[in-house]
Amino acid sequence: MSQKPQGYHLTELPAEPSAVPGCAKCLSLVNARQNARSTGDYSAVSDCNVGLREHHAEAH
Ligand SMILES: [Zn+2]
């Protein structure tokens, strides 16, 4: 019998995009994300992650 444990949920955060070394755009987005996190502005944090993913898709 294999049953999934009840009440199981992910505690792991989804992987966040990280800066590509030497890319100023990545760096500025990652800096903005860090600032947003330090002020507790998590909607801005996720905006930065979205921006990073889009930028990664376009530029890297
Ligand atoms: Zn970049």
Image (cartoon, rainbow, N blue to C red):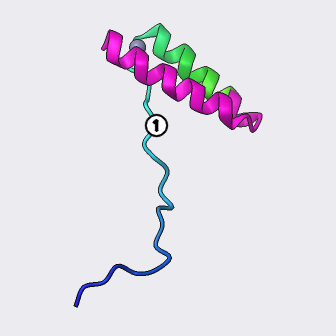
State the image coordinates of residue 44 (x, y, percent, origin top left).
66, 28
Q: Which residue is pictured at 50% across the width and 20% down the height?
A: 51
State the image coordinates of residue 52 (x, y, percent, origin top left).
46, 21
Instruction: Judge whether residue 35 is colored magenta.
Output: no
Q: Is mark 1 within 8 Å of ligand 1?
A: no
Above or below for 18 versus 2: above
Q: Which residue is pictured at 56% across the width and 24% down the height?
A: 48
Q: Residue furthest bottom?
A: 1
Q: Residue furthest left?
A: 1
Q: Main secondary structure of the magenta part?
A: helix
Quarter of image, res 23: top left
Give, as a single range, the part of the protein colored magenta. Answer: 36-60
Above or below for 2 versus 21: below
In the visual, does 34 lie left or right of 2?
right
Q: Nearer the viewer, residue 48 or 8?
A: 8
Classify the position of ligand 1 by quadrant: top left, top right, bottom left or bottom right: top left
Q: Which residue is pictured at 47% across the width and 62% down the height?
A: 10
Judge the density around disc 1: few (<14), some (14-19), many (≥20) Cα neighbours within 10 Å.
Answer: few
Instruction: Judge whether residue 40 is colored magenta.
Output: yes
Q: Which residue is pictured at 42% across the width and 42% down the height?
A: 15
Residue beneath disc 1: 16
Quarter of the image containing the C terminus? top left
State the image coordinates of residue 58 (x, y, percent, origin top left).
34, 11
Quarter of the image containing the N terminus? bottom left
In the visual, does 1 lie left or right of 44?
left
Q: Nearer the viewer, residue 34 or 21?
A: 34
**Residue 21 seen from this side:** no
Q: Nearer the viewer, residue 60 or 23?
A: 60
**Of helix, strand and loop, which one carries label 1?**
loop
Look at label 1 and name its amino acid.
Answer: Glu
**Residue 47 seen from this side:** yes
